[in-house]
Image (cartoon, helix red, strand yellow):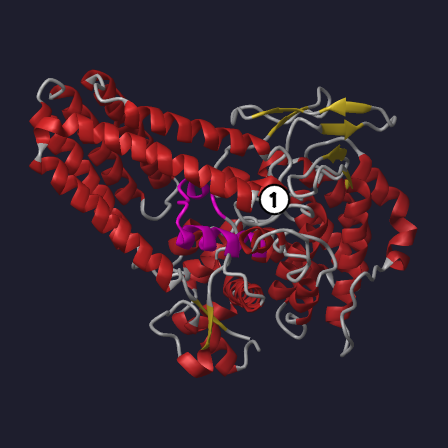
Amino acid sequence: MSIGRRIGKIISGLLIIAGAFILMKVPEVGHIIIALILAVSLLVLGISSLIYYFTMARHMVGGRDTLYTGLIEVDLALFTLSVTDVPKVFVMVYLVAVFGVTGVLHILRGLEAKKKQASGWCWRVIDGAIYLSVAVLCQIFLQNTVAMVTIFAFGLIYLGAERIVSSFYRSKIVYVQ
Amino acid sequence: MNKDFHYYGTYSAAILAGYTHEEALRIAGSAFFVDLCTKPILSSVGAPVEAATTMLAMEMADTGSDPISQQDVSRIWASFHFLPGDLYSERKGCGKRYMQRYHLICRPNGDLLVDTVSQVKGKDLEATGLAMHVLADTWAHQYFAGTPSRVINDTNYHFYEILPDGSERPVKFGSNPAATDDPEKGTYINSIRQSRETSVMNLGHGRAGHLPDYSFMRYKYMPAWADYEEVLKDNPSDFMHAYCQMIYALKFLKGEGGVFKKDTYDTQAVEPYRERIEEILLKRQIDACADWKEFGESLSGQEVPDFEISEYQEAYRQAPEEEKDNTPMGRFILAALSQKSMVTNRVYKSGNLLLGVTSDYKKWGTKGIKAYMKLMEAMQKGETS
């Protein structure tokens, strides 16, 4: 990994953690912040798709799909940004689903990896357990904005920390001729 | 290519190249072991996992989209199964990011193939076997890249099988892992379509299923990178080229001096057996082991035993520490480290970081990276060079 990429991962990890703390600081408007995060995520996704199209996918057979996807994502992001009265339940159900599915997949992959004696299975199970816990707890505290936002923020902190730690992995090998 | 060609096929090629039965078995065993040597296999006997030459489906599924994981995957697949054909090819109007992937497209007769074969000359038969696997795969896996890349490896609905009578039939792909390929019905398994550029589903020939690995298969399709131009893949012809080039390479490695030449095939050695070989290649079967085994045994007059991975592992596990490098698995590991190191360096020097970064040992030392010290120690002992 280049130094630039390492720095980028560390910065994005720190930003995610900072966002989590801000979220905990003002839990009463948590769902608005979450909607904002959703909109920003969609905007980032959309812009990424457009960049991907113009730099790579336009050379690909059937690459125009990427262009249309990017435009739709950007459109949805702008729509979400424009909505001030987002139904809280809708946002929470979405978050619970994302964390729950991710958690279950991580655990299943971890257990399968254990069977195959693959390395790192333990971390995958732990990751899965954390995501799943966040989902379950969000479901339990669906009516309690403060608790729910705190739980979501914890998930964000974990995500940010994971990005920072992964930026320290080695990727270089020694060339021997 | 599967066990049929990599093990039994390589065995018969080695016999035709003049190797003894025992030598041919060592070469064939090593050629096939390339498809088995995963990190879990290596770690189970305490060997360095950096020598892995393939990955479990499970490991693949867990591959992240971060550069480290991508480089780790690409080093394995590009070095051993999808050897890049031309690291400096040009294409107008394409950016650097695209070209880095484009340069990793596997093709036969590239400069890296010359390096792959040349570097094992004078080394152990396990190194020879490993090189034969890489050589054979450049034919079967051409047009795909050993890195997760949608813009290179994706395929679409325009995919037709050309049947023996010359008629065309649309290929029906499915992604049910429990199902199997059925050449009679024309239904095959491929990887799931993923829009993410770096998804492992977009690695190698996953989107074309196992079609590139079947010797009887003829098909035409539109590769993602080919600018809407149809490509015809004639596996019987490609497999025959691979076979003849293997015999030439094996004779080169067995002989004194000389230079390995690209685009050179020993058709003379094959000529007396051409009909039988073509019969095996054209037979519509998923597994041609029995036919290749029978052919190999008819050449050597000896029984060709099945490859036993446990013997490889056990010999390595039981050998004293200082003798491990002299076991078949130990020699294979050194050859694998050497190949991976060479390919990574060539790709890095071309300005392409998709396989990672290499460093000059004499200038920088190992900087704490211990895995490749095994190769350094072997070089210093004169076991490899």
Main SS, magenta region, reads helix
SS of the residue under disc 1: helix
What span is in magenta? Answer: B55-78
Query: Residue B40 location in percent, x, y?
Result: 41, 50
Q: Image quadrant for the N terminus of chain B?
A: top right
Q: Nearer the viewer, residue B152 or B1?
A: B152
Identify which residue is drawn at 51% across, 53% down.
B74
Describe residue B34's horizontal placement relative to residue A82 as left or right: right
Please tell me whether residue B368 is drawn above or below residue B223 in the rendered image: below
Circle 1 marks a residue in which chain?
B
Examine the rendered structure and indicate whether residue B87 appears above or below residue A38: below
Whether residue B137 appears in this view of the structure is: yes
Residue A35, quarter of picture = top left
The quadrant of the picture occupied by the C terminus of chain B is bottom right
Measured along the vertical axis of the image, is residue B380 above or below residue B54? Answer: below
- Provide the residue designation for mark 1: B152
Residue B242 place in picture, x, y as percent? 76, 52
The answer to whether residue B191 is left or right of residue B217 is left
Q: What's under tag 1, amino acid-wise?
A: Ile
Observer-nearest of B206 and A162 = A162
Q: Which quarter of the figure has residue A173?
A: bottom left
Q: Residue visible at 54% across and 61% down?
A: B352
- Sort mark 1 into few (<14), some (14-19) or many (20+) by Cα contacts within 10 Å: many
- In the image, farthest residue toward the front: A82
Q: Is residue B302 visible?
A: no
Look at the image and say whether residue B63 sits in the magenta stretch: yes
Q: Which residue is depicted at the point 25% across and 47% down? A: A162
